[in-house]
Amino acid sequence: MSEEQREAAVALFETGWGAWAVATRLGVGKGAIKRLYGRWRTRGGTTLVAKPTRPVFSFEFKLDAVQRYRAGEPKVALAKELGLSSPLLLEKWARQYRTEGEDGLRPKPKGRPKTNPGTARKPESEVEQLRRENERLRAEVAFLGKVNALRDGEQR
């Protein structure tokens, strides 16, 4: 969605239009407009001032927010009070809490886990080594057989 479309959407929100009507009017995906609408409901006219940043929230903060949300507090009001960029963040945390429990809200390490070069491959058993060598030798024999057949065909 372009900057002009975002500005037009916010202008329509402020005149009373809903997310679906704005999406239809601007010919933009409903998911993108729904996310923008949620941010607009939380942040008001400052929605477009700066793109939302990704602050890091503590485990305790997330847990408190999810417990309040699950207790029945409206997500938009709660997101405003807590200074969240969007009410969808509460839904995401609640989903993580529902599927993984409290551990779903704990910070996770970034990136791929480190592995030692020596432990990346488990050692092969002697039988596996012999099977691999047998496959390689069969491929060599087949290749040499074809080379010999081609050579014999040229000599005639």
Image (cartoon, rainbow, N blue to C red):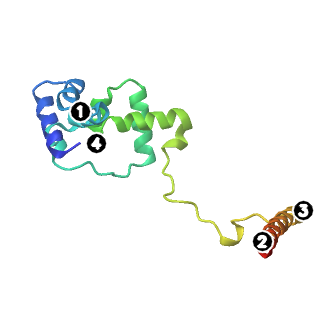
CB under 8 Å between callouts 4 and 1? no
**Residue indicated by mark 1:** 37
Q: Which residue is drawn at 52% across and 32% down?
A: 98
Q: Name the front one of labels 1 and 3.
A: 3
Residue 77, horizontal then vertical, whole percent: 27, 30
Amino acid type of the residue tagged 1 in the rendering: Tyr
Amino acid type of the residue tagged 2 in the rendering: Val
Give the quarter of the figure containing the C terminus: bottom right
Q: Which of marks 1 and 2 is nearer the N terminus?
A: 1
**Residue indicated by mark 2:** 147
Mark 4 crowdedness (10 Å alpha carbons): few <14, some 14-19, many ≥20: many
Q: Which of marks 3 and 4 is nearer the N terminus?
A: 4
Q: Quadrant of residue 43?
A: top left
The Cα atoms of the two marked residues, 3 and 4, are separated by: 58 Å
Q: Name the front one of labels 3 and 4.
A: 3
The Cα atoms of the two marked residues, 2 and 3, are separated by: 30 Å
Q: Residue at x 13, y 40 (%)?
A: 7
Q: Name the front one of labels 4 and 2.
A: 2
Amino acid type of the residue tagged 3 in the rendering: Val
Residue 126, horizontal then vertical, whole percent: 89, 66
Residue 26, horizontal then vertical, whole percent: 18, 32
Q: Name the front one of labels 4 and 1.
A: 1
